[in-house]
Amino acid sequence: MSNFVYLSKDKFRELESELRELKTNGRKQMAERIAEARSHGDLSENAEYDAAKEEQGLLELKISKLEDLLSRSQTIDTSIYPQDEVHILSTVKVKNMNNSKTYTYKIVSPEEADLQKGKISTTSPVGAALMGRKVGEIANAKVPAGVIKFEILNLE
């Protein structure tokens, strides 16, 4: 897994903070839970101890995954991209030509995508169709339900 992951500076800081929290407070709380469960006696029949040890394994797995993600990540410098076309971290206002509704999306890496927050991935059908387009252009997104035509209205 040596492929790079592109993250915004905000997302990178958020993940660093989460990792720091898990490694300090998360591990401390887990050690306390294991010590508490251990104090209940015979470990061979102690379900609370088994559960705490399993949770510890999941915590360490999450820490490991975050460390791997951060080690492979690069923050994005948007100044290198043309400002008149859609690129990663662009905020784009589009009109769905099929239903005449307008939407505003921020184009992000797959790791940051969150449709509820209006963040769509560069690799999603809509995100991929918008990449490289300019204001006034039409983008055709091939989605499972067919093709959606989007007119690019504004770009930030």
Image (tube, grey):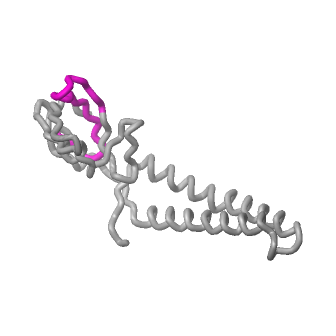
Nearest the camera: 50 or 84? 50
Q: Name the outermost residue toward the left.
A: 137
Magenta-drawn segment: 85-104
Quadrant of the snapshot with the N terminus? bottom left
Q: Is residue 153 visible?
A: no
- Left or right: 1 with respect to 17? left
Q: Is residue 8 magenta?
A: no
Location of residue 106 by image quarter: top left
Determine the residue positioned at 11% across, 35% down: 138
Location of residue 139 by image quarter: top left
Nearest the camera: 41 or 14? 41
Determine the residue positioned at 39% across, 53% down: 111
Residue 60 location in percent, x, y?
A: 60, 67
- Left or right: 72 with respect to 54? left
Above or below, comparing residue 154 to residue 42 in the picture: above
Quadrant of the snapshot with the C terminus? top left
Residue 108 location in percent, x, y?
A: 33, 46
Above or below, comparing residue 41 to residue 156 in the picture: below
Determine the residue positioned at 22% across, 41% down: 145
Determine the residue positioned at 57% across, 58% down: 19
Residue 53 location in percent, x, y?
A: 70, 69
Above or below, comparing residue 80 to residue 39 in the picture: above
Residue 57 location in percent, x, y?
A: 63, 68
Nearest the camera: 74 or 129? 129
- Left or right: 106 with respect to 22? left
Q: Name the outermost residue toward the top.
A: 100
Nearest the camera: 5 or 79? 5
Q: Is residue 128 visible?
A: yes
> How many marks are shown on the rendered structure?
0
